[in-house]
Amino acid sequence: MHDEQSAAITDAALDREIARVLGVDPSPEFAARVRQRIASEPAPAGWRAAWIVAAAGALAAVAVVVLIASRPPRAAPATAVPLQARSIEGVGMLPDTGGAALSGARGEAAARTRHLGRSVPAAVGQRAGTGEPEILVDPREARAIRAFFEGVRDGRIDLTPLLAVVPSHAEPEPAGDIHIAPIVLDPIGARSGAEGVLR
Amino acid sequence: MHELADELPRRLVAVESELELEFERRLVESSTLAFRVAYGVLRRREDAEDVAQEAFAKAYRNFRQLRDRDRFRAWLVRMTWRLAVDRRRSDHRRAARETIHATEAPTMTTTDHVIEHERSQRLWEAIDALPEKLRVVVVLAGIEEHDLNEVARLLDVPLGTVKSRMFTARARMREHLQCTMNSQQQ
């Protein structure tokens, strides 16, 4: 390189020289010393933290699963009627009152009830597509209403006494005159010592 | 469920073992690289080994946080370089060491060795005269005959930047060596 330098130092010659001076290998025991140093290091904090988080998460998950699995199944109340049974099946068979007895919103409700009675599952909380709530009618009530209407139609039930019933509540008595005593205000007089003294 | 509770620690141990094994693989393939990077700055075998060891210990502590494990070499190189530079800066006995280092040369028996040592000294002086940004490129390119693409990858800078720095570094080194030679001839 001495000669090269005296003339002109080429890139290749320079790179060769640099590679030569840097071509030093570590001692054979270098890797072993690094391993020893690493072995003496405390476990990396990140690893420990990950361990703790993972273990805590796993324990929490296991605890939740155990809790859910060990809980006794909730017994259905004996008197409860299954939701499906409470649907308005058969309501469509309600006698059509011709709309005379029902009017306004009641008529709409009845129409809706008839519609629902056909096929909408009772478990669904809303009518499909309309967003309106489904009306659930106890079949026993439906049977009673049906029987009532049939009874009226057949003449077995006479409703005339109902029409003749006098309202049970009495007319309110007219309110008497109310006497209110006039309010008397004492005149504001100049009393000695009651006011400030002008200077 | 209880199987899950038993299985989880086993899996965690397995994951940790895998990490340990992977780090061991990285250590084997990168130990010389780290040493040479440190040597390129410190030029003392013992110091370079100390710094490389420290870099590996640091890498081990943070290995899990390294998302892209393929970047391990670049990560290690930068860490080692920084540690070595810090070590060199903070080492107040550097001048004394260089004196000791210089006195080691005359123990060489043959004249060729003495000449080679002088050549190396001149080259190191030229490298030392470079600013750090240029020096790191020269050192990395000189280690294991890295091509400039590899240097760019290790330093995480564009290839054009590396080429430009290499060009400037060579020019300055040539100039430095030429001046040295001329002064010796005179």
Image (tube, rainbow, N blue to C red):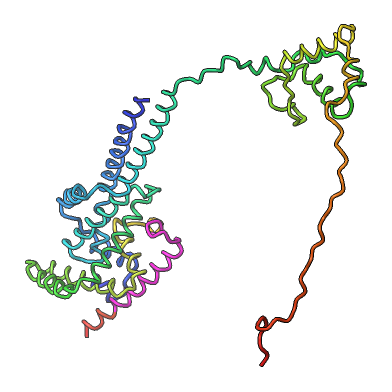
Give the main secondary structure of the magenta stretch.
Answer: helix
Residue A22, image x, y percentages: 24, 62
Q: How many numbered marks, from 0 up?
A: 0
Residue B148, image x, y percentages: 39, 59
In the rendered image, which quarter contains the C terminus of chain B? bottom left
Q: Nearer the viewer, residue A62 or B89?
A: A62
Magenta-colored span: B151-178
> Residue A115, located in which quarter of the rendered image?
top right
In the rendered image, which quarter contains the N terminus of chain B? top left
Could you tell whether B10 is left or right of A192 in the image? left
Q: Nearer the viewer, residue A172 or B161?
A: A172
What residue lies at 82% left-to-right and 25% top-to-bottom?
Answer: A109
Could you tell whether A148 is left or right of B162 in the image? right
Residue A150, image x, y percentages: 85, 9
What residue lies at 28% left-to-right and 81% top-to-bottom?
Answer: B179
Could you tell whether A159 is left or right of A34 in the image? right
Q: Nearer the viewer, residue A75 or B65?
A: A75
Residue found at the very far bottom of the displayed protein: A199
Residue A89 within the segment the image draws in magenta: no
Residue B161 within the segment the image draws in magenta: yes
Relative to B158, is A119 above or below?
above
Could you tell whether A84 is left or right of B95 in the image? right
What residue lies at 36% left-to-right and 73% top-to-bottom?
Answer: B171
Q: Nearer the viewer, residue A62 or B156?
A: A62
Residue B28, image x, y percentages: 25, 47
Relative to B160, is A50 above or below?
above
